[in-house]
Image: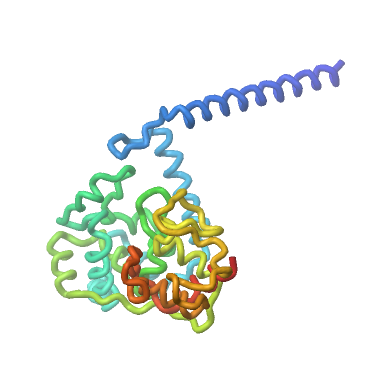
Amino acid sequence: MINTRRRLVITTVAATLATVGVVGGAIGLTVLYGGFYHIGATKSHFPQVYHVLERGLLESVRFHARDVAVPPAIAREADTPPGAPSATYRASSQVVRGAGLYRDNCVTCHGAPGVAQDDIGKSMQPVPGPLSDAARRWRPNELYWITRHGIKMSGMPAWQYHLAEEDIWAVVGFLVALPSMTPRDYADITAQSGAQQRAPRQSFAQADVGRGKLAFTQYACHACHMIPGVVGSDTSVGPALANLRSRKFIADDLPNNAANLARFIRDPQAISPHSAMPAMGVTESDARDMAAYLLEQ
């Protein structure tokens, strides 16, 4: 009798869960294909959606940043009372350099003490808020991870292919000092930093297919080209890059090999003046990696 009742309870629960799953899936598909959810940036997410996304962001960053080693000077300052970095730390060359890099690359979306975001930053959803309190909400290893890898579907770019490691850490070092800065402090430190030239990124003598695949996403190549193995929108702005190794020529008359392909990736108009493809600032090392990836497909 007990076993029969238990089986009945289990069967009922399983059937209920299956029904809920089917109904939930049907509702989800209806919302998806009906286009009912407003994806425009003039309307915020529902609070429940926002909080789910924010929780997912928090936990993902914590997990992936857990093994990042923080430079000792930054780690020490991060453990001082909130908003009270030492004058010596704030005056350090790393923090001053980070202030200039922040001014040149981050203020557009995040603003700064006494400095408003540009229209781009004001108009995003979710809004990329000010980072004046970022060091109170995130540990330095997490700030580094976010800066290096970016956040999908948020407008936050990955800087891995555009800033050297030392420059990413300089930005993090500056963010640790930022909570205590007044508008005057920020104006003074950015004036002190002067015009910043980005440090050169690490280069590699040997081409690497894995790095090449990642580089295609970081130089926006998949915005115009269909690239094997690289997820992106269907596009026909530029030619599809599948089976490139079977082609005899690049841009009609340049023999197809790794060296020539890397040259074309770096400066397409020097080889084909009528090409609409712009130079994307690809480094020599990255171009070798990208050529290696394409010729492996």
Instruction: State the residue in front, 155 or 97.
Output: 155
Q: Position of residue 110 (x, y in %)?
A: 26, 54
Instruction: State the residue in front, 247 or 161.
Output: 247
Residue at the extreme front:
253
- Report which quarter residue 5 is drawn in: top right
- Report which quarter residue 217 is drawn in: bottom left
Image coloring type = rainbow
Q: As displayed, is residue 224 above or below residue 126?
A: below
Residue at the extreme top:
1
Q: How many marks?
A: 0
Instruction: State the residue in front, 86 or 100.
Output: 100
**What residue is drawn where x is 44% and y is 71%?**
252
Tell whether 36 sits left or right of 294: left
Q: As displayed, is residue 5 above or below residue 151?
A: above
- Report which quarter residue 34 is drawn in: top left
Q: Is residue 142 visible?
A: no
Q: Position of residue 116 (x, y in %)?
A: 17, 53
Tell whether 272 sits left or right of 112: right
Q: Quadrant of the image for the C terminus?
A: bottom right
Q: Position of residue 166 (x, y in %)?
A: 37, 75
Q: As displayed, is residue 109 above or below residue 99?
A: above
**What residue is drawn where x is 23% and y is 57%?**
108
**What residue is drawn where x is 24% and y is 68%?**
99
**What residue is drawn where x is 46% and y is 67%?**
215
Q: As displayed, is residue 202 above or below residue 149?
A: below
Q: Is residue 294 visible?
A: yes
Q: Quadrant of the image for the N terminus?
A: top right
Instruction: State the residue in front, 114 or 225.
Output: 225
Residue at the extreme bottom:
205
